[in-house]
Image (tube, rainbow, N blue to C red):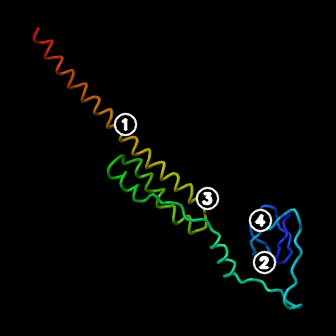
Amino acid sequence: MIHCNRCGEPNNDYARFCSRCGTSLIANDSSEPASPQQPESQGQSKTPSLNEIQQKMYEQRAQMPDTYLWQSIVVTILCCLPLGIGALINSTQVESRFMRGDIVGAQNASRYAKNFCIASLVSVLVIAVIYWILILFGIFAGGFNEIFNQY
C-alpha cells in the first residue's frame, strides 16, 4: 500500500493519485509509510477542488502522439489508395482519442497510421521496381528477337 504524503490515506500500489485528496503519489516512497500532515485548522482539512485536480492531471498528461495526417493524405493520393484510407482513418482518430483521455488508444491509432503510411509507400515502391524490371526485360527481349530474326 502507498500512503499519501499529504493526507495519509492508504492507496493501492498501482495508484498514481490519492483517492482522497488527488495528490500525486508518484514521488512517494512505498518502503516507508508517510505520516499524515496536520491540516491548518483543526476542524476542516483543505481538499482541492475538482478544477485543481483536473489541472494537475492535465499537467502530468503525456504529450499527444503524432497524427501522421499529412503523410496519410500524401500516400492516399500518390501511392496506394486502400492502405492510404486505413492511414487516414487512424490518423483522424489520434486527436479525438487523446482529448477523451484515451492515451493508449491515441498511441495505438498513431502507430497504426504510421504503419499504414509505411506499408503504402513500400507497396508502391515494390510495384514500381517490378514494373521497371518488366520494361527492361521487354526491351531486351525485343532486341534479342530482332537479332534472332536476322539469321
Few, some or many residues within 10 Å of mark 1 (<14, 14–19, 20+): few
Q: CA distance from mark 1 to mark 2?
A: 58 Å
The front one of 48 and 105 is: 48
Q: Which residue is mark 2?
A: 21
> Crowdedness of circle 4 by 10 Å Cα count: few (<14), some, many (20+)?
few
Disc 3 marks which amino acid? Val
> In the displayed structure, does residue 116 sit left or right of residue 132?
right
Using residue 53 as the reference point, say whether residue 147 is left or right of it.
left
- Looking at the picture, which amino acid does disc 1 mark? Val
In the image, which disc is placed on residue 126? 1
Circles 1 and 2, Cβ within 8 Å, touching? The answer is no
Q: Position of residue 102 (x, y in %)?
A: 61, 63
Task: Check whether the beta carbons of the residues at disc 3 and disc 1 lie within 8 A of each other.
Answer: no
Amino acid residing under circle 4: Ala
Location of the C terminus by quadrant is top left
Query: What residue is drawn where x is 12% and y is 12%?
Result: 149
Residue, disc 3: 104
Sequence-first disc among 4 and 2: 4
- Drawn side of residue 39 relative to residue 75, left or right: right
- Residue at 53% x, 56% y is 109
Cα–Cα span, label 2 and label 3? 26 Å
Labels 1 and 4: the sequence-earlier one: 4
Locate the N terminus and report the quarter of the image it occupies.
bottom right
